[in-house]
Every structure is written in structure tokens, then in C-alpha cells.
Image (cartoon, rainbow, N blue to C red):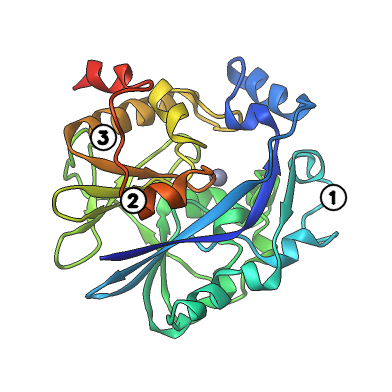
Amino acid sequence: MKIHAIQTGTVTIKSRQVEGEGHGARRLLNTFVDREWTDPLPIYAFAIEHPEGVIVVDTGETARASQPGYFPRWHPYFRLSVRSHVTPDDEIGPQLRGLGINGGEVRWVVLTHMHTDHAGGLHHFPRTEILASRADIAIASAWRGRVRGYPNNRFPSWFDPKPIDLAQQPSGPFPQSLSLTAAGDVTLVPLHGHTPGQLGVVVDEGDHRVFLAGDASYRQDLMLRGAIDGIAPDEQAAAETLRRIQAFVAERPTVYLVAHDPETAARLDTRSVVEGDSGGDAVKSLA
Ligand SMILES: [Zn+2]
């Protein structure tokens, strides 16, 4: 199966967002007051050329996010903690066309979660069925959603995602799952923590699988260390999710791809699976 990593520009965030410090409300505060910025990090979305139709996982960021006034100035996160750089050609629509994929022929868009840098390219998919978890749709809606950091006033007016409820069907260490394709080779799994209903997409390629894990961690090494980010509202859920991912990648060879890891495209290209060497003790101990 052809899987494309599509980089829709970059985002610069606080170092403490990538790896949180402290616990509870303190952890969020530490992220806001952090003076240290990361290097520009990629914003990845993905396209899977599946026999049943093209599946797009996340839509990246829009070029409009680089313009002043796009994000609400009253919101401390957007005002103080994030800077994105996206050109019109970086957006997912033109990049899909460059790959020979017309937005109209995309069968499904799966939003791992609805943060701006995953939902910024929605306007390229007006005729596609868009799926998101029921919990994340609820959390991102209305004025409360905007306070929580979802600029839903920028979502297209037609945007009405289909709420996904996972089935009580375990998939390895994940207690629920849902098969997206009739062939059963693309599966949604729960990655609660970074957001209440974050979804992961697992593509079975036979002797290995490719795991599109949203923002479950900002890099692979942080997942292996069980390091929680600096903005996840539920620290316990985030920790549990990382333990499940560690167990999952220890079960079978898995290429682990998250949206802001600078190594994501290279690991996808070479189908580089999570190895047990650097930091792999965490994996082995759970195996
Ligand atoms: Zn996110």
C-alpha cells in the first residue's frame, strides 16, 4: 500500500509542550511560561492509497494560520505558545494534487484529533466523509471549544464530522478498536490523553504495520520513555496510552509515525520499525 507523509509547513512550540514538566495544572503552566522554543517542527498529515479508496489521516495546517488575526488574540496558547509557517503550496490540497490524488476522490478523512494543525486543511475536502471521535467532537464544539483551544470558527461552515464510537473489540493492548476498511487492514484505536478521544490509525502491511499515532507523543523516543507532553488535559490517560503503544509495538514490527517528529517521513520511507535498542528497554520489559 502506498502511504504518503505530507508535510504542511512547520510549527514552533515551547520545549515544555514537547515534554511536559511537573504535574496537574502546573504542567500546563510550565508550558506557557517556558521561554525556550523548539526548532521548527514538521506538521504531517498522511494519505493512504487503499484499494477501497484514498484515506487521508489529518489535514495539516492552513496557510491562513500564519497570518495575524487568524487565531484569537485573547487566547493565551495562540498568543504566547505557538507560531506556524505554512505557505499556500504547503497545504494538503495542492500536495495531494501533486501526488495525482484529487481531493474529490478521497474516500475518508480521519481526524486523529481536532487541534488546528490537524484540522487546518478541512476546506480541501468538502465532499468527503470526515470521521472524528465523538468525545473530541464534543470537546471542540461551541464557545467552550474555542476556550479549550479549538478555533472552530475557522472550520468550514459545512463541516459536520461523523462521530466515531469504537467497538468493544480489543486490538492487542487497546481495549477498543474499529475496522475502517472492509478488508480489515486499516483499524482505528483509542489514544486518549493528548485529547479525550484521540484516535490512532493502524495500517496492516503484512509483515509489519504502520501506526499513524497523531500527537500521542511528539517523537518516537518520548513514546519509548513514556514522557507525557505539556498540554495533555489527562495525564493518567496519556501515560496509559503510551504504555499501550509500547506494548503494541513490542508485539509485532511497527513503524511509529507521529505528526511532529522530524524523523517521521524517513521512517515511513524505509519502513523503519521501532527497535529495542535506544530506549527499547521500555519495550522489552512490557513484551
Ligand atoms: Zn495536537
- Does residue 135 show up? no
Label ID, residue 44: none
The amino acid marked with disc number 1 is: Arg
Left or right of 53 on screen, residue 220 = right
Q: Residue at x 16, y 45 (%)?
A: 169
**Camera-side residue: 43 or 136?**
43
N-term mark: 2 or 3 = 3
Disc 3 is placed on an element classified as: helix
Q: Residue at x 72, y 56 (%)?
A: 85
Q: CA distance from mark 2 to mark 3?
A: 17 Å
Q: Nearer the viewer, mark 2 or mark 3?
A: 2
N-term mark: 3 or 1 = 1
Q: Residue at x 84, y 50 (%)?
A: 73
Write down the quadrant of residue 107 in the picture. Answer: bottom left
Classify the position of the C terminus by image quarter. top left
N-term mark: 2 or 1 = 1
Q: Residue furthest front?
A: 270
**Camera-side residue: 279 or 243?**
279
Residue that carries the numbered disc 1 in the rendered image: 73
**Camera-side residue: 40 or 61?**
40
Residue that carries the numbered disc 3 in the rendered image: 249
Write down the quadrant of residue 283 in the picture. Answer: top left
What crowding class fits label 2: few (fewer than 14 Cα within 10 Å), some (14-19), or many (20 or more)? Answer: few
What crowding class fits label 3: few (fewer than 14 Cα within 10 Å), some (14-19), or many (20 or more)? Answer: many
The amino acid marked with disc number 2 is: Thr
Asked if labels 3 and 2 touch by Cβ distance under 8 angstroms, the answer is: no
Label ID, residue 270: 2
Q: CA distance from mark 2 to mark 1?
A: 42 Å
What crowding class fits label 1: few (fewer than 14 Cα within 10 Å), some (14-19), or many (20 or more)? Answer: few
The amino acid marked with disc number 3 is: Val
